[in-house]
Structure formats: C-alpha cells, structure tokens
Amino acid sequence: MEPQKALISEGIWGDSNVIPRDTTNGLEDATLKKWCYWDGKIIKDDEGKYHMYASRWDEKYSHSKGWHIGSKGMHAVSNNIMGPYVDKGLLWPQWKEGIGHNVIGLRMHDGRFAAVTSELTDGEIFVSENPNGPFKLLGKIKVDPNGFSMGLARYQNKTKPHYGHMSNVKILLRPDGRYMLIGRSTAVMISDNGILGPYKIMSDRIYKKYPELPQTRNEDPTIWYSGGMYHIVYNHWPTKTSHHFTSEDGIADWKYRGIAFKKEEFKIFKYTDGTINDWQFVERPTAYVENGHVTHFMFSVIDVKKGQDRGSDNHASKIVVVPFDGVAFDKYMQKLVKEEKK
C-alpha cells in the first residue's frame, strides 16, 4: 500500500498491532470522535470520483451491539481510490431512520446507481440517477427457489414459519446483461428481469462438493468477473481463512482454486516502506474491477477481538483499500484453465 500521508502513531485509536498506520487509507474516523465503519463497495463515477457505499455506527456502541442496533447505510467520496474517503452522511435517512448493514453499491445496467442493504433488513435496493443521491427505495429483492431451499437465500425466521432477512448480499452485472446475486450461502442466483429479480436459485453452496472444506461458518462472499471467468472468494471466520473458486459460466462447474488468504499467515496490509498492520479480524472482502481487471480489494478490519471493542474506548473498525495486480492474476488464471483443458 502506498501511503497517502505519513504513517502516524499518536492521537489515533488502535492497539500496537495496527500502529503506525495511514489513517487516510480507505475510510476511518481516526480520532474516534464519532464513527466505526464496516462493509462497503467502491464505484467510480463518470467524473473520476470514487464513491464508497458502506455502513457505520456510533462509537458509543461496542462492535457487537453497534452492528446489531446502530448500523446505517452511508456514503463517502474520494478523489483517489486509496482514500481518504470523506463521510457524506446517510444514504436513505427517510427510510427506517437510515438502517442498513452489509451495504454495497453498484452501477446498474441502465447506468443508474444502486445501493443494497441486507442482514438487518429483508434485502432492499435503493437507486439514484446521481452517485451522491438522493437514493430512493426501488423495492425488495425477490427470490424464486427454483427447486432449491429458500434457506439458501434468506434466513428462516425462528419464531414464524417463513423466511426473512437476506445476508451478505453481493450483486454482479454479468456481461450477458443479467444480474447475478450471491449471499452468505454462496448459492448462485440469476435474474433475467432486472435488479430486483426474481432471482432464480441456480446452485447449492459452491463448496458443498468439496467435503474437505469447512461446511459451516462460512460468510462474506465477494464476486467478480475478470479474465473471462467468474470468481468467488468467501471467508471461513473461525480459521480466518478465505477460499477462492472460479467458474467459466458463473453458474455451474465451480472449481476450488485454493486459499485466497489466511490472516495468520499472509500479511497483506504492508506499506511500501515495509511497515505491516496486523489487523485482528479481516472480513468483508470486496473486489474493485476496472478495465476488466481487479485493481484493488477492500476489507473491513478491527484492531482487537470483536468482544474486546467495548464502545467509547480506544478500539474500532475501518475499511482498508489494498492494491492488487489483476492483470497478472488474470494471465495466471487463464494459463491455468488452458492447461486443465489440455
């Protein structure tokens, strides 16, 4: 990571494992005057500005309480993809006081800007002609089980016989003009009828046919298309390990490609001067693709174990942006697939 400003140690939050650091990388409230940040996805507008659509909660809450009861969808802007991102406020303050979590943004096939919320909500999409808003509720995501369990798309309500909230929703614009959605289960869902769906569930969990991989406690999948193939990376949170899969059609034949990163072994938050920030939890990976290749990844990070962030203390979370050589990556993956076909 190329620092946007000098790495600093004084007057900022965090344990020694994340100090010194570049507080202008990504999105953070360096002095913890107000906010903890999480989730997010970056969109570049037609004028070259970068818009981050994410979630935030008041620092007065602990991490576990903050995302449960205080998380709201928000918008930040930067002239540089690495940051700093300036918090511009809530995305939809007019709707349920701005509630939002697992918030992402995307550009729709018709050019409009969309922001999505799930986990704390049923899975809603808000749209705007302008990346700065105002964002208005378009509707709730619809799902067609298509012979699969609805539990692959939505949580089953523990007290009522129906399915409610979606979780970890990511939506991808496919080259064929359709929309592709994955949630926490990693099951692939496809819509032929616009961003609201209905999304047909097209597969089971992509890791199900690999019994050697953990079959539970997987979350935070991200999806992208580059180098002529679809990619999914998801996180197994107990082992802090993220796994990588690819598919040529994005629906079937998902192949396991190995570990994308393992927090305890791969020190991915390294600055150009060699300084390393060893964040305690690294979650919510999200790919940024430009000109057909991934150029950066975003991560939600926290400096201590989540239960140790008590609120109004010296611990918090932020969103970090890390550069990635997507051209080399796609070249490598294409060569690998070509050799497999031989």
Image: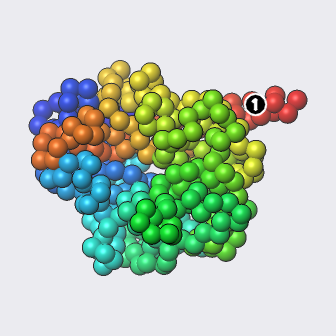
Front-lying residue, 263 or 310? 310
* In the displayed structure image, the side of residue 223 where residue 271 appears, left or right: left
Q: Tell me, yes or no, if residue 104 can be seen here.
A: no
Quadrant where the N terminus sits is top left
The x and y percentages for residue 67 are 30, 54
* In the displayed structure image, the side of residue 193 where residue 282 appears, left or right: left
Front-lying residue, 205 or 88? 205
| Mark 1 lies on residue | 335
Front-lying residue, 236 or 20? 236
Quadrant where the C terminus sits is top right
The x and y percentages for residue 52 are 39, 56
* In the displayed structure image, the side of residue 27 where residue 141 appears, left or right: right
The structure residue drawn at horizontal position 11% and vertical position 37%, both measured from the top left corner, is 11
The x and y percentages for residue 194 are 63, 73
Going by the numbered disc 1, the residue's amino acid type is Lys
Badge 1 marks a residue whose secondary structure is helix
The x and y percentages for residue 335 are 75, 30
Disc count in the image? 1
Front-lying residue, 39 or 48? 39
The structure residue drawn at horizontal position 58% and vertical position 57%, both measured from the top left corner, is 152
The structure residue drawn at horizontal position 52% and vertical position 41%, both measured from the top left corner, is 216
